[in-house]
Image (cartoon, rainbow, N blue to C red):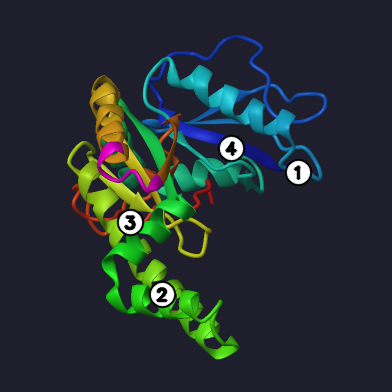
């Protein structure tokens, strides 16, 4: 039977609550597979599993329960291995990697930061900073709205200026937050956000990180900044090209296989 993997821990990790239920309908009982110094938190995998709210919450609950006893490397929802032997084989094959990650992520949580422009505020900035846009907008106003061509030209200029500002503001936001994190994972582009970044933060320094987010909101009031966390460190199970917060760690979708 296929095996659903919730996360990876040390073999010495405290026992999970008896009867802990995971994904599926009815919920599958969670168990632990041990291989050397590592263990995997698993259950039987339901057939035709879909990311429904009930199962997403069950996945998160298992990780939360396991996390109360120490560090857990969280797997993404839907991580399924062929069988138990496949899971323990990966634990053995990647033992050094997983043990290093458990040490690196111990006592740390993830905060995901997403940001976008407040439309009216960023247009105000663009108009204030770009003399060419101001002049063309004024010419169009005096001409009763301007010609079709001049309207198109103005729209293209504004769009280009806003796009350039997105890149600048994304960099500025990250600069304000990087120093408060142990590592950074930049999310994929084309997500609809000018910034989509995950930060690895010491649990004991979470208040400092959130205070830095508030300072960033004050310094960049034309941005809408959303915070999601604390989360299990999903984006940091796989190491990136550099661990320091000054470098992007390139989080990846991870699974036991």
- Mark linked to residue 138: 2
Residue drawn 28% across the image and 37% down it: 218
- Mark linked to residue 5: 4
Task: Identify residue for label 1.
Answer: 50
4 or 3: tag closer to the N-terminus: 4
1 or 4: tag closer to the N-terminus: 4
Determine the CA span between mark 2 and mark 1. Answer: 54 Å
Question: Would residue 124 be seen by someone viewing this image from the given angle?
Answer: yes
Determine the CA span between mark 1 and mark 4. Answer: 15 Å
Q: Nearer the viewer, mark 1 or mark 3?
A: 3
Secondary element at tag 3? helix
- Which quadrant holds residue 44? top right
Point out the residue furthest to the bottom here. 149
In this picture, is 158 found above or below 250? below
Residue drawn 59% across the image and 22% down it: 61
Find the magenta span and give its range.
218-223
Question: Observer-nearest residue: 190 or 89?
Answer: 190
Indicate left or right for 179 with 90 as reference. Answer: left
């Amino acid at each position: 039977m296929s095996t659903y993997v919730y996360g990876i821990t040390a073999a010495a990790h405290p026992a999970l609550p008896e009867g802990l239920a995971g994904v599926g309908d009815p919920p599958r009982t969670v168990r632990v597979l041990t291989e050397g110094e590592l263990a995997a938190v698993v259950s039987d995998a339901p057939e035709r599993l879909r990311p429904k709210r009930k199962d997403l919450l069950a996945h998160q609950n298992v990780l939360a329960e396991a996390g109360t006893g120490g560090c857990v490397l969280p797997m993404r929802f839907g991580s399924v291995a062929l069988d138990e032997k496949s899971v323990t084989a990966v634990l053995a094959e990647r033992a050094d990697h997983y043990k290093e990650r458990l040490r690196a992520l111990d006592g740390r949580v993830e905060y995901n930061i997403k940001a976008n422009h407040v439309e009216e505020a960023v247009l105000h900035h663009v108009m204030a900073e770009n003399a060419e846009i101001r002049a063309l907008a004024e010419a169009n106003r005096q001409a009763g709205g301007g010609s079709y061509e001049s309207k198109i030209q103005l729209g293209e200029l504004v769009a280009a200026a806003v796009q350039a500002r997105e890149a600048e503001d994304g960099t500025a936001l990250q600069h304000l937050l990087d120093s408060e994190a142990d590592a950074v994972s930049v999310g994929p582009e084309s997500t609809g956000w000018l910034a989509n970044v995950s930060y690895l933060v010491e649990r004991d320094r979470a208040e400092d990180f959130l205070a830095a987010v508030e300072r960033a909101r004050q310094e960049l009031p034309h941005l809408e900044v959303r915070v999601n966390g604390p989360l299990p460190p999903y984006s940091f199970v796989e190491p990136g090209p550099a661990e320091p917060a000054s470098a992007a760690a390139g989080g990846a979708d991870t699974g036991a296989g």
